[in-house]
Amino acid sequence: MHPGSPVARAHEAVSEVLRPGDVALDATAGNGHDTLFLARSVGPEGTVHALDVQAAAITATRKRLEAAGVANRVRLHQLGHQALPDFGRRLLHLHDSLFVALFQAPAQLLRL
């Protein structure tokens, strides 16, 4: 990741508010780079929920998390963005607070 890149700036912004023990949501797991960042950020007591519609993305993310030793912090869900509003509401019922990290996700997802 290049300093000053949009991803680096996003990670910096997330780092200012996400704490160990938090619950985070990555709305587009992709290859797992941001999911790994979130898993490290929430620490062993936190949880990350990562979504992706593609089975290959879920597999790639799982492998990356396992290699880093943080797979137990992440729940992977093969879901598309259209499921996010209902999924997000269910998560809010399960957790007192939920940090939503919307890397590469459409703006309408902010309407949880």
Image (cartoon, rainbow, N blue to C red):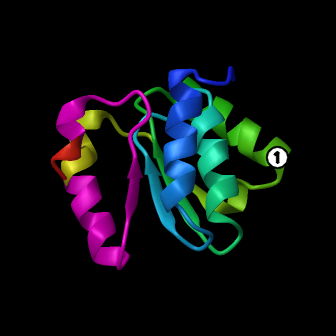
Q: Position of residue 61 (x, y in %)?
A: 64, 36
Name the residue: 66% across, 30% down.
Answer: 60
Q: Position of residue 22 (x, y in %)?
A: 52, 69
Q: Residue 99 sits in which quadrant?
A: bottom left
Q: Position of residue 16 (x, y in %)?
A: 53, 56
Q: Residues within 10 Å of mark 1 (few under 14, many from 20)?
A: few
- Magenta highlight on residue 101: yes
Q: Position of residue 4 (x, y in %)?
A: 59, 23
Regarding mark 1 in the picture, which secondary structure is present there? helix
- Residue furthest out toward the front: 4
Name the residue: 57% across, 21% down.
Answer: 5
Q: Nearer the viewer, residue 41 or 28?
A: 41
- Is 92 rendered above or below residue 34? below
Left or right of 34: which side holds 40?
right
- Magenta highlight on residue 39: no
Magenta residues span 86-109
* Quadrant (top left/top right/bottom left/bottom right) for the N terminus: top right
Query: Mark 1 — residue?
Result: 68
Residue 61 visible in the shown view? yes
Name the residue: 60% across, 56% down.
Answer: 74
- Is 26 rendered above or below residue 10? below
> Which amino acid lies under the numbered mark 1 shown in the image of this protein?
Ala
Q: Residue 21 sits in which quadrant?
A: bottom right
Left or right of 103: which side holds 58?
right
